[in-house]
Image (spheres, helix red, strand yellow):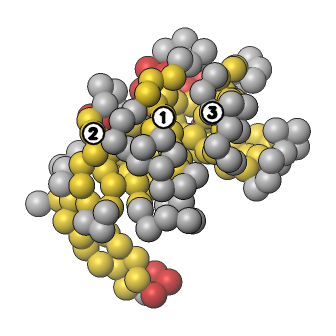
């Protein structure tokens, strides 16, 4: 059996939950306005807790990161520049073209339904301002970027290999 661990009372106790997959899982997204939790992983695994963990779909490529802004709308990024979007709570997923030339994407973060960022292999940094058309922000820095997070519409951070920490103050 495979398990997912749930935190109770601010991390004092952890509760083991059954997982419908034996694949490695990489990231969790919990939109504030929803009671749903999402996780993604190897083999294109996408799981949703509704209230028990259920497999939603298997993508062709490994899914490395997930970002939901509400219970309906979310994005998944993964290997070979894959970007997928749902507006139907994971029932259907739409592939979005990526300008990252097949490089793996490791993290995705959305500020709202339109503005989002993805980072990954060789320092690739992508942005969308309409929730679907992605642009390459600038030349890669060749250090892999593993996580991206924005504290407001303009200020964001990304971190990666070799101690890389990048900050933007103009989105």
Which mark is first along the chain, 1 or 2?
Answer: 2
- How far from the left and from the top, in percent, is residue 148? 64, 44
- Residue bearing the label numbered 3: 131
- The numbered mark at residue 49 is none
Secondary structure, mark 1, is strand
Q: Which residue is drawn at 11% across and 60% down?
A: 1
* 59 w.r.t. 96: above or below: below
Q: Quick one: 21 or 93, which is closer to the camera?
A: 93
Name, please, the residue furthest toward the front. 88
- How far from the left and from the top, in percent, is residue 119? 61, 33
- Residue bearing the label numbered 2: 57
Q: Which residue is drawn at 19% across and 65% down?
A: 18
- How far from the left and from the top, in percent, is residue 86? 45, 38
- Residue bearing the label numbered 1: 85
Instruction: For marks 3 and 1, give the CA distance.
Output: 9 Å
Instruction: For marks 3 and 2, give the CA distance.
Output: 21 Å
Secondary structure, mark 2, is strand
Which mark is first along the chain, 1 or 3?
Answer: 1
The answer to whether the residue labelled 3 contacts the one labelled 1, judged by CB atoms less than 8 Å apart, is yes
């Amino acid at each position: 059996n495979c398990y997912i661990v749930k935190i109770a009372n601010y991390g004092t106790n952890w509760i083991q939950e059954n997982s419908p997959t034996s694949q490695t899982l990489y990231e969790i997204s919990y939109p504030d306005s929803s009671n749903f939790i999402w996780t993604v992983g190897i083999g294109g695994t996408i799981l949703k807790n509704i209230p028990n963990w259920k497999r939603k779909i298997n993508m062709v490529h490994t899914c490395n990161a997930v970002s939901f802004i509400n219970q309906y709308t979310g994005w998944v990024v993964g290997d070979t520049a894959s970007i997928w979007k749902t507006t139907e709570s994971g029932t259907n997923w739409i592939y979005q073209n990526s300008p990252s030339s097949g490089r793996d994407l490791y993290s995705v973060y959305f500020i709202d339904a339109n503005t989002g960022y993805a980072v990954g292999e060789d320092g690739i940094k992508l942005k969308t301002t309409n929730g679907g058309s992605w642009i390459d922000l600038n030349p890669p820095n060749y250090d892999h970027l593993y996580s991206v997070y924005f504290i407001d519409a303009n200020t964001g951070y990304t971190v990666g290999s070799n101690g890389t920490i990048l900050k933007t103050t103009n989105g």
